[in-house]
Image: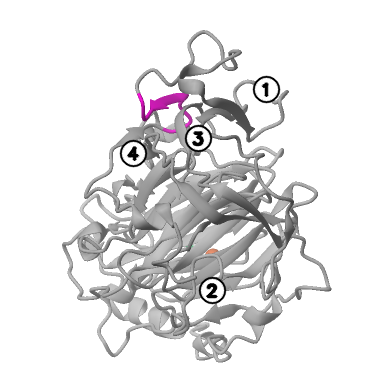
Amino acid sequence: MSAEETNTAAARTPFPAELIYNSGFGNHFSSEAVSGALPHGQNSPLLCPYGLYAEQISGTSFTSPRKHNQRSWLYRVKPSVTHEPFRPRVPDHVKLVSEFDRSNSSATPTQLRWKPADVPEAPTDFVDGLYTVCGAGSSYLRHGFAIHMYAANVSMDNYAFCSADGDFLIVPQQGSGLNTTKSKSKPISHYYADHLGLWITTECGRLQVSPGEIVVIPQGVRFAVDLPDGPSRGYVAEIFGSHFQLPDLGPIGANGLASSRDFLVPEAWFEDVPCPGYTIVQKFGGELFTAKQDFSPFNVVAWHGNYVPYKYDLSKFCPYNTVLVDHGDPSINTVLTAPTDRPGVALLDFVIFPPRWLVAEHTFRPPYYHRNCMSEFMGLIHGGYELDDLMSEMAKADGFLPGGASLHSCMTPHGPDTKTYEATIAMENEAEPKRISNTMAFMFESCLMPRVCPWALKSPYMDHEYYQCWIGLKSHFTREPLRVDSQEGKNEDGT
Ligand SMILES: O=C(O)Cc1cc(O)ccc1O
Ligand SMILES: [Fe+2]
């Protein structure tokens, strides 16, 4: 059937120009698309208002401590259980992994970098365009993560998707007609102001997510992605057995980094139209299963709870950083963290490198050379990474491009390339403040060691020459004493 013939209610219902959201992180929300649809005083009355069915979705075990416990109650036209049996999805050309071992992925300590992937020419929706790059652990054992990327050019037609494996943190990188013109002063949202991004219909309501924003769809929550504006490309971190939370702020105090009130949660929205042949596609243990039903899963008239999808605009992030010497550790820029049972050890941190001022003195300002016991996957949403923007065209570091990616696994050495090192030193450690404006990079950082999927290793976008960017780093060692550029012996004005 063509898109015109199918009864694709979700795809056909245009989103309003501006959606209204609830605001807050981890709140217990209540939302009614029809006034009075939420029961009062109890969750599961004998008969719910308007003859709705009550259904609970749990994101944590029933007995999880109260401060971690996540669940929502959905009041819907028909319950989710009304469907034909799940069957393996055909054709099964899926490049998704949720239990990483020798049969489906490789160990490699090499520094890896990928160029941005082209959006396919053949019609490809969000689910078909999704492929796993790397990951670790197991969704079956509820401990691990997978990093996927996607490139899509059509809306999902007459079906909804959910992952039984884990929460999806989606980072859209590109919408159609992306304006890449550089500006020193524009916030990232301006670059994408005309782009509608992803229209995501979920059981809890609808979200519009543009590049520069992120969205989290919790494990099991059903959603459909429409592309009103044409092709889209981006990154996904899927976490098994943990949920994202805001990082503790420690000595920073009560404010800063990502603020609770900037997280936006949908308002209840439903459709109640016949949907013959509607399909639920469920990712379960890395495999896709389908089940037919004759109604839309977006039939939740009201809901309440704290297990909800949410979005966040990265330009709202309030960065803190070095104000005197030394490059700070990237954890200072953590937007969200998915914890393990070990304090301070993340299953997955989502860290950003937003526009900001560089003001450090006597300091090599780019990231230091390092080897990390955690593994670092990086993506670039917009502009250049770190000092790219400040360098002359001659010295401009290249190779890490918007839509591209890199992976520096556990204990794999990495740091600024030769051009960045030389250009930084050539700036003679200028002490005056500099603004990095044209940038929005991010990192998924995990305590687990990722294995890399074969299609990512064999990808035509793999940059096999990546190692070359460090080969030119020369020895500057001399037995002659160098001018020691430290604070010692200096006056407050630097003289
Ligand atoms: O490797 C990277 O580019 C990520 C990173 C950034 C930074 O500012 C400090 C450490 C670090 O791993
Ligand atoms: Fe790093």
The local secondary structure at tag 2 comes to strand
- Going 25% across and 84% down the picture, which residue do you hit? 392
Q: Is residue 3 left or right of residue 245?
A: left
The Cα atoms of the two marked residues, 1 and 4, are separated by 26 Å
Dot 1 alpha-carbon crowd within 10 angstroms: few under 14, some 14 to 19, many 20 or more: few
The Cα atoms of the two marked residues, 2 and 3, are separated by 27 Å
Where on the image, by quarter, is ligand 2? bottom right
Dot 3 alpha-carbon crowd within 10 angstroms: few under 14, some 14 to 19, many 20 or more: few
The residue wearing badge 3 is: 248
Asked if residue 459 can be seen in this view, the reply is: yes
Give, as a single range, the part of the protein colored magenta.
Answer: 25-34
Of callouts 1 and 2, the N-terminal one: 1
Of callouts 2 and 3, the N-terminal one: 3
Q: Is residue 423 above or below residue 232?
A: below
List x then y, in percent, for residue 80.
Answer: 61, 39
The residue wearing badge 1 is: 65
The residue wearing badge 2 is: 406
Instruction: Nearest to the eye among marks 4 and 3: give it.
Output: 4
Question: Which mark is on residue 262?
Answer: 4
Snapshot quadrant of residue 301: top left
Q: Is residue 154 magenta?
A: no
Please count the marks in the image.
4
Asked if residue 369 can be seen in this view, the reply is: no
Q: Is residue 202 left or right of residue 402?
A: right
- Going 48% across and 57% down the picture, which residue do you hit? 170
Of callouts 1 and 3, the N-terminal one: 1
The local secondary structure at tag 1 comes to loop
Of callouts 1 and 4, the N-terminal one: 1
Looking at the rendered structure, the kind of residue marked 4 is Asp
Looking at the rendered structure, the kind of residue marked 3 is Asp
The Cα atoms of the two marked residues, 1 and 2, are separated by 37 Å
The local secondary structure at tag 4 comes to helix
